[in-house]
Amino acid sequence: MSRALSVRISDRTRAKLAEQARREGIKVHALAVRAVEEAVRTATHPAVRFEDRGEGRRAIVGGWELWEVVAAFLYAQEDLAVAATELAVSPQIVEAAIAYYGEFNEEIDLLLAADLAARDRHARDGQGDFGRGIAVLRNAPGRRCA
């Protein structure tokens, strides 16, 4: 559910918003909504930022897409230190990703499921041995993706 919210912004900010929307090829309203949503998420999860990646807008933590950090944590059987070592980040980065995941798990689960599907396709096509990682992720405690 969404609700309308009326806010006043300076002419300068409005012009910058319109210019950015034009560059991205989206409506000013859509950019404003995205900016507010990301600002609220970042205020709650300060280690997380957002950026455009090849597949769309993504949550980023420690230089990694956030879903990748969650996947590493699950592959490591929920061992923070092991996941952090694998990614060459601090355990605090992994903790930040898990905290974000706790609040926004539905969107991260979609990315995890898409990754599993891609790994399955590669394994079936003989393009890699992903079997161990897939099994660990599928059987990880609390996993909801198929």
Image (spheres, rainbow, N blue to C red):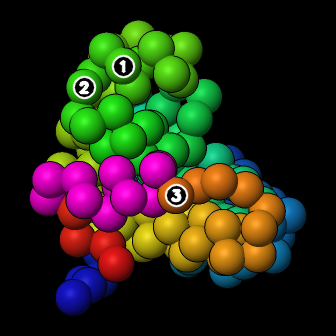
Q: Residue at x 42, y 46 (%)?
A: 71
Secondary structure at numbered mark 2: loop
Coordinates of residue 111 in the picture (x, y in percent) = 48, 66
Is 141 situated above or below 1? above
Coordinates of residue 124 in the picture (x, y in percent) = 67, 76
| Res 65 label | none
Q: Residue at x 53, y 23 (%)?
A: 87
Q: Which residues are magenta?
A: 132-142
Mark before the other along the chain sequence, 3 or 2: 2
Task: Select label 3 or label 1 by which is in front.
Answer: 3
**Viewer-proximal residue among 66 and 71:** 71
Q: Is residue 49 visible?
A: no
For the residue marked with disc 2, what is the amino acid?
A: Asp
Q: Residues within 10 Å of mark 3 (few under 14, many from 20)?
A: few
Taking the image as shown, residue 116 lies to the left or right of residue 7, namely right
Is 79 situated above or below 128? above
Which quadrant does the N terminus fall into?
bottom left
Is 5 situated above or below 140? below
Coordinates of residue 52 in the picture (x, y in percent) = 70, 54
Q: Which residue is mark 2?
A: 79
Determine contact: label 2, label 1, CB under 8 Å.
yes
